[in-house]
Image: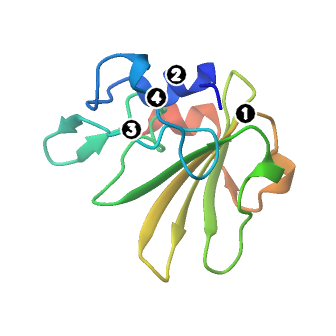
Amino acid sequence: MEMNIEVVDYQCVGCVYDRSVDCFEQGDIGIGCKDHHAGTMMVGIGKLLLGMPKGFNRIGPYLDFAMFESFEDGDGYDKFNIPTWKYLNSKGHTLVRGHRPRTNLTFVHVYLENCMDKVNCYEVILNDINSMD
């Protein structure tokens, strides 16, 4: 599968694996790069995903990050995969931040479409993002 240009916008920015997009390696889930490694550190916060807006960029100790062309390409949500926040960015992409309580993992999903009506959780708006630290 060929790399989607959004991988460059959301994953390559700040990736420490290889400072070029030539290192793209197709992931097992979605359209993202499986070799992506967030490398920007902020004291007291931890690692950041530079290509993501505030509220979706802090990864904590563990993060599952996946990108999908459409909502139907994703895994869906249930009691083991719970969306917490959703946000429609200026590109018309839906960003979802959530939690997997069974494994205590945080996830961020990027859908390259507006699928806000298919995700049942709190909608974060631009004003919320602008007011975050």
**Distance CA(mark 4)–CA(mark 2):** 13 Å
For marks 2 and 3, the one nearer the N-term is: 2
Helix, strand or loop under label 2: helix
Disc marking residue 64: none
Helix, strand or loop under label 3: loop
Q: Which residue is mark 4?
A: 24
Residue lying at the far left of the rendered structure: 43
Q: Nearer the viewer, mark 2 or mark 3?
A: 3
For marks 4 and 1, the one nearer the N-term is: 4
**Distance CA(mark 1)–CA(mark 3):** 18 Å
Q: Nearer the viewer, mark 4 or mark 1?
A: 4
Look at the numbered discs 1 and 3 and tell me whether their residues touch, using CB distance below 8 Å. Answer: no
Q: Which residue is mark 1?
A: 112
Crowding near pointer 2: few (<14 within 10 Å), some, many (20+)?
A: few
Q: 14 or 119: which is nearer to us?
A: 14
Helix, strand or loop under label 4: loop
x, y percentage for residue 133? 35, 38
**Distance CA(mark 2)–CA(mark 3):** 12 Å
For marks 3 and 4, the one nearer the N-term is: 4
Give the side of residue 116 with respect to residue 80, left or right. right
Which amino acid lies under the numbered mark 2 shown in the image of this protein? Asp
x, y percentage for residue 129? 52, 36
Residue lying at the far front of the rendered structure: 1
For marks 1 and 3, the one nearer the N-term is: 3
Q: Nearer the viewer, mark 1 or mark 3?
A: 3
Disc marking residue 36: 3
Work out whether 16 lies above or below 98.
above
Which amino acid lies under the numbered mark 3 shown in the image of this protein? His
For the image shown, how many numbered marks are present on the structure? 4
Crowding near pointer 1: few (<14 within 10 Å), some, many (20+)?
A: some
